Image (cartoon, grey):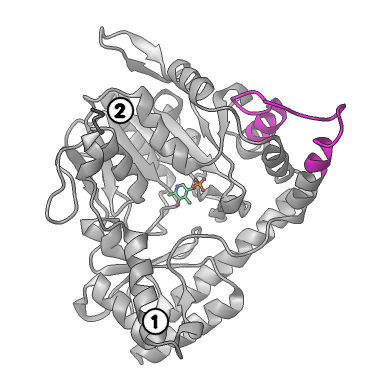
Amino acid sequence: MAYLNDNFLKLQAGYLFPEIGRRVAAFAAANPDKAPNIIRCGIGDVTEPLPMASIEAMHKAVDDQAKAETFHGYGPEQGYAWLREAIAKVSYQERGVQVSADEIYVSDGAKCDTGNILDIFGHNNVIAVPDPVYPVYVDTNVMNGNTGDAREDGSYEGLVYLPCTPENGFVPDVPTQHVDIAYLCFPNNPTGAVANYDQLKKWVDYALANDTILLYDGAYEAFVTDGSTPTSIFAIPGARKCAIEFRSFSKQGGFTGVRCGYIVIPAELTAKDAKGNNVPVSKLWSRRHTTKFNGASYIVQRGAEALFSPEGQAQTRALIDHYLTNAKLLSEACREAGLNVWGGANAPYVWVQTPNGMGSWEFFDKMLEEALVVITPGAGFGAHGEGFFRISAFNSRANVEEVCRRIKALLA
Ligand SMILES: *Cc1c(COP(=O)(O)O)cnc(C)c1O
């Protein structure tokens, strides 16, 4: 007899995006004449081609594999040094943030990393998650047995939820109790909120005082363009003693289908073993990574490296600017339609309050049926997302302009 990990059976059946897919498919099947005009602003996937510098580097890397002299087999599990050095230099050191190449672990994406990191932590931690939140943090804790059962509203026993509300600008306050691990994500998915220096410093001070480890998801850092918002948790003094940072090339370089990300674990970061000794977190992650992962593809790492060349940087900037302009247009249209709007600056997501207190799934159906626009209902990201919806700015300009017209017409 083989037994299953019963923790998986605690997971809520209707995961957000399958449910959206089901409703869109049902509407399209019942309305074949309207189906071709549906515009999807739901799932946060990029739409535009990759920077050409990256494409050229990957073509060249494929050719490298055709000749014995330039062929690459298994690479270092941690990632090629040339990629880690480029990341450390351009993404951190040139911005005055201390991170060295040997603190960086290259992977096939931040989704896997944010889930896999739980392998190295014990099951007796008190874990805090923002609400609303990127569902991966919660579901991977459920799978790992770090929670109790699901409640009626979709939340889980045993997790500490940090409400993100209009009152705190969707930047969660530090917990009023002790927690061992806390997830943070800025610029935020789904709310588009960014945390300023003082807000992050409060979190770092809390973490240092409470021996908390911050799991900081910076997947959208490249969208920060205002010059004052920190792009890394390590820009805050003391963060090297209390934080792990997750990064991805998915949204920055359009790599959602190419797959490459990385994680930064500072040398100083420690956590306790069962005997109460402080052990470097990087030691366990390195052991895990080299045992369960055989490195990101050589071709993909060459593509990622090219994003740091001067041409790659300029092309990445243009790609990000395209999405940021979309976000600005969508925010303006929602405001003109009389809605309350957050996010949409330094982030590719616009977070909007539903009109007249409508439920977020109710408004999802209305947008789909009457405007032929797919949005993401806030309730899918947590109980505090109820009454809000997310519009993704990952789209072509023509689609975004059309969505703006339709929102204004719908609510006129
Ligand atoms: C898109 C996204 C990621 C990136 O995931 P990849 O696996 O690198 O594609 C990570 N965190 C959040 C919050 C995201 O929205």
Q: Quadrant of residue 127?
A: top left
Residue at the image point whose x is 52% and y is 76% from the top: 329
**Is residue 7 highlighted in magenta?**
no
Please, is residue 81 above or below residue 301 in the view?
above
Give the percent coordinates (x, y) of residue 347: 49, 59
Judge: label 1 CB < 8 Å from ligand 1. no
Please, is residue 302 above or below residue 50 in the view?
above
Q: Quadrant of residue 168?
A: bottom left
Region in magenta: 60-89
Give the percent coordinates (x, y) of residue 341: 36, 71
Horizontal side, residue 98 vs residue 358: left or right? right
Crowdedness near tag 1: few (<14), some (14–19) or many (≥20) residues, C-alpha within 10 Å: few
* 340 vs 386, nearest the viewer: 386
**How many numbered circles are shown?**
2
- Residue tagged 1: 29
Q: CA distance from mark 1 to mark 2?
A: 50 Å
- Residue tagged 2: 212
**Is residue 85 highlighted in magenta?**
yes
Amino acid type, mark 1? Ala
Of the 4 image quadrants, the one containing the N terminus is: top left
Q: Is residue 98 at least partly visible in the picture?
A: no
Horizontal side, residue 185 vs residue 386: left or right? right
